[in-house]
Image (cartoon, rainbow, N blue to C red):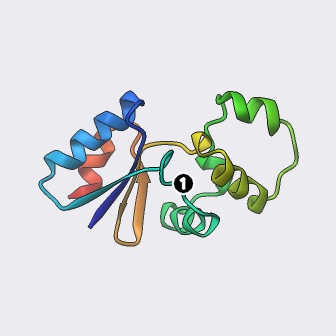
Amino acid sequence: MIQIYHNPRCRKSREGLAVVKSSGQDYEVIEYLKTIPSTKDLQGILTALKIKPIELIRKNEVVWKELFKGKDLSDEKIIEAMSEYPKLIERPIIINGNKAIIGRPTEIIQDFLN
């Protein structure tokens, strides 16, 4: 089953969800601001994405700029920051089995699901 880490207030995330819905495949929506991923969940997502934790950070978020920008943070500290402040997590994230993508631009989602 496809999973989408989704923020309904984000236009790109809503567009990504629409692509997932239109695929006709079974999916699960995870509103990650309500169901905050644990550090273990985030490690699994990062493994599926094949990226470093810093690549999943929304660096323009106020909390990043105020608390973390310019600091020398380990991967573990970045993952902890995302779990503590889930607004830092880039969105939408689409997971299909052991593969995942960040659905930006949304056009890549369709190819990923095929």
Q: Residue at x 24, y 57 (%)?
A: 113
Q: Against 50, is 14 above or below?
A: above
Q: Amino acid at mark 1?
A: Ile
108 relative position to 104: left or right: left
Q: Dividing the picture into quarters, in which one does residue 46 lie?
A: bottom right
Q: Against 53, is 48 above or below?
A: below
Q: Dividing the picture into quarters, in which one does residue 10 lie?
A: top left
30 relative position to 22: left or right: right
Q: What is the quadrant of the C terminus in the image?
A: bottom left
Residue nearest the viewer, comparing 35 with 26: 35
Residue 89 position within the rendered picture, expressed as x and y whole percent measured from the top left? 57, 45
Task: Identify the element where label 1 is drawn.
Answer: loop
93 relative position to 78: left or right: left
- Total count of labels: 1
Q: Dividing the picture into quarters, in which one does residue 57 lie?
A: top right
Residue 38 position within the rendered picture, expressed as x and y whole percent measured from the top left? 59, 63
Residue projecting furthest to the left: 24
Q: What is the quadrant of the N terminus in the image?
A: bottom left
Q: Residue at x 68, y 57 (%)?
A: 79
Residue 71 position within the rendered picture, expressed as x and y whole percent measured from the top left? 87, 42
Q: Which residue is mark 1?
A: 36
Structural crowding at the residue carrying mark 1, measured as other residues with C-alpha within 10 Å and reported as few (<14), some (14–19) or many (≥20): some
